[in-house]
Image (cartoon, rainbow, N blue to C red):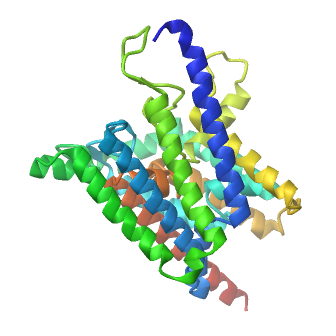
Amino acid sequence: MQESDLPALVTLVLWASFALAVAFGAIAQRTHFCTMGAVADIVNMGDWTRMRMWLMAMGVAMIGFNAMVALGWVQAGQSVYAGPRLIWLSNAIGGLLFGFGMVLASGCGSKTLVRIGGGSLKSLVVFCVLALAAYATLRGITAVARVATLDTVALTLPSGQDLPSLLAAATGVPRGTLALLLGGAIGGAFMLFALAKPEGRSADALLAGLGLGAVIVAVWWVSGRLGHLAEHPVTLEDVFLATNTQRMESLTFVAPMAYTVDWLILFSDKSKVLTIGIVTTLGVVVGSALVALLNRSFRWESFGGSEDTANHIVGAVLMGVGGVTAMGCTIGQGLSGVSTLAIGSFIALAGIIGGAVLALRYQVWRLDQGD
């Protein structure tokens, strides 16, 4: 590739990512997809409908990503999730903080963006506070604390922490073969569980599960295949275009919120350029808004009082700190991360679910105290 061809390729990667994020936002708005709501439905009502959506999306993402690994298109180790250094304590504690926070804030990062598209002013406040807390945890005061404490507790594995790489190192079986087998088996099991009950086979459940899972896979392809240059024409280095991490990326919505605010504030700084994380953050809002306007569900929403405001602000801080510490949110780790079959992603996901359950129990206790 010639240097003169780079701008056009970067533009294509950004527009493709934006379009996929618009689809994600539209589907999430249309189907009421919500990972916090999925956990709350089970804890409060025993209803697994939205959890089946999430599990089906996980299954599709696992099968799709690992099929691409088997084809030689991408490698799990080229993402931030599957490196050899397993920061298991950061994954667990960060996930716990994020899960607790998303209940207080009435939804995770992706739901915050979807609700902004639907007219929620309090979600706009959550977005701003979450972005500030996330930026501080990436580069500021909480970043120093994170690096000096939780991140020091780690295991260094002989290979990548994704299951195919670990088993390939132990057995000698080709990684691509193991990726196809494990991705198909684990992802297929998740899909079968999701489809086992009638509620998992409803139109909305199928649209959310199949559609959102496919979006995750497609963004992996855009970043890891379309936007990958084995040899940059200027630096001659291996590079993934338009990414904040300098690695291949799929959807995630904590650090990208911080990068979005940074880009908006420092727009005149020519070093601040659009990335996949920024355009997908904006794309989810646009997709959600389009559906909300078309089906006339767009409604302005504000805080119900001082306690409601405080809960959302505290929840946003916990999500910002926890999401960066855990290296992802319910989408970043719960869909994109687990699709790579990385051990840290499953630890973070368990922490997120555990934190959400604790927060739901806390809310019940608060109601009992009010009585």
> In the picture provided, is 2 more to the left or to the right than 155?
right
Q: Nearer the viewer, residue 31 or 143?
A: 31
Which residue is located at x 38 percent, y 43 percent? 68
Q: Nearer the viewer, residue 140 or 300?
A: 300
- Name the image quarter holding residue 77: top left
Q: Is residue 54 above or below residue 272?
A: below
Q: Residue furthest bottom?
A: 371
Q: Residue at x 57, y 29 (%)?
A: 13
Q: Is residue 116 visible?
A: yes
- The quadrant the C terminus occupies is bottom right
Q: Position of residue 32 (x, y in %)?
A: 69, 66
Is residue 93 left or right of 3 when viewed as pictured? left
Q: Is residue 319 above or below residue 38?
A: above
Q: Percent position (x, y) of residue 39?
A: 55, 74
Is 42 left or right of 368, judged from the image as shown? left
- Residue drawn at 66 percent across, 69 percent down: 204
Image quadrant occupied by the N terminus: top left
Location of residue 289 with respect to 307 vertically, above or below: above
Between residues 251 and 157, which one lies in front from this camera angle? 251
Give the farthest residue toward the left: 171
Classify 15 as above or below 3.
Answer: below
Q: Can residue 156 be seen in the rendering of this structure?
A: no
Residue 272: percent from left, percent from top: 63, 22
Residue at 48% across, 56% down: 335
Numbered-mark total:
0
